[in-house]
């Protein structure tokens, strides 16, 4: 069964996100996906090894439900409500990505050259994924939250550190896209 829908307009999605943020604000909770990694590590016993993981993870159970909902909602949207297999991106970007070896550009949500199973046999790709994950994990912890936590929660709460973090995320993204990415590929 494939229920095909057009994407929701930004003003509908934006209002839905704003309502969720209002409910979280009224309940005294703060949203952020990266904090769930800490919670999952704590559940698995990491608190025996590092002080950072010694906290009451049960107080964060609600946030794990958010992660589960995001996974289920994303899966439903991708498999049952999507009318195309790729994000619409500029044709110049597609051509540029193809010159870098990404033949799946413009035809898939994720670059197959990085996310298919065969990539795990390539040492170069494994190194890129390892260091990418390391930098993202370090950056999210060092910044006191991930992009969703700062850009959605922090900015909606008018927090200056979140504004600074979001500006930093964009600058880092631009540097990666225009300078480092072409060097790596």
Image (tube, rainbow, N blue to C red):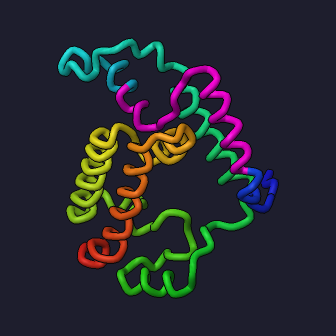
- Residue at left offset 28%, top offset 21%: 53
Residue most toward the left?
49
Is residue 21 a member of the stretch shown in magenta? yes
In the picture shown, does residue 22 fall above or below 82? above
Main SS of the magenta part reads: helix
Q: Quadrant of residue 86?
A: bottom right
Q: Is residue 22 left or right of residue 160?
A: right
112 or 178, which lies in front? Answer: 178
Residue 3 is situated, as x and y percent measured from the top left of the image, at: 81, 54
| Magenta part of the chain | 13-38
Is residue 44 a member of the stretch shown in magenta? no
- Residue at left offset 19%, top offset 21%: 50
Q: Quadrant of residue 42?
A: top left
Residue 183 is situated, as x and y percent measured from the top left of the image, at: 24, 77
- Residue at left offset 73%, top offset 46%: 15
Q: Quadrant of residue 28?
A: top right
- Residue at left offset 26%, top offset 21%: 46
In the picture shown, does residue 23 fall above or below 86? above
């Amino acid at each position: 069964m494939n229920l095909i829908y057009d994407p929701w307009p930004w003003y509908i999605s934006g209002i839905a996100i704003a309502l969720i943020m209002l409910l979280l604000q009224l309940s005294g909770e703060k949203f952020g996906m990266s904090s769930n990694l800490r919670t999952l590590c704590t559940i698995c016993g990491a608190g025996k090894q590092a002080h950072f993981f010694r906290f009451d993870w049960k107080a964060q159970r609600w946030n794990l439900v958010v992660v589960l909902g995001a996974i289920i909602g994303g899966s439903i949207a991708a498999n049952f409500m999507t009318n195309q297999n790729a994000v619409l991106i500029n044709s110049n970007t597609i051509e540029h990505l193809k010159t870098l070896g990404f033949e799946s550009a413009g035809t898939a949500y994720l670059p197959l050259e990085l996310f298919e199973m065969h990539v795990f046999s390539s040492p170069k790709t494994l190194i890129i994924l390892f260091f990418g994950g390391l930098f993202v994990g370090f950056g999210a912890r060092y910044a006191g939250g991930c992009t969703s936590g700062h850009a959605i929660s922090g900015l909606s709460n008018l927090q200056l550190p979140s504004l600074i973090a979001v500006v930093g995320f964009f600058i880092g993204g631009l540097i990666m896209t225009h300078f480092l990415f072409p060097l790596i590929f």
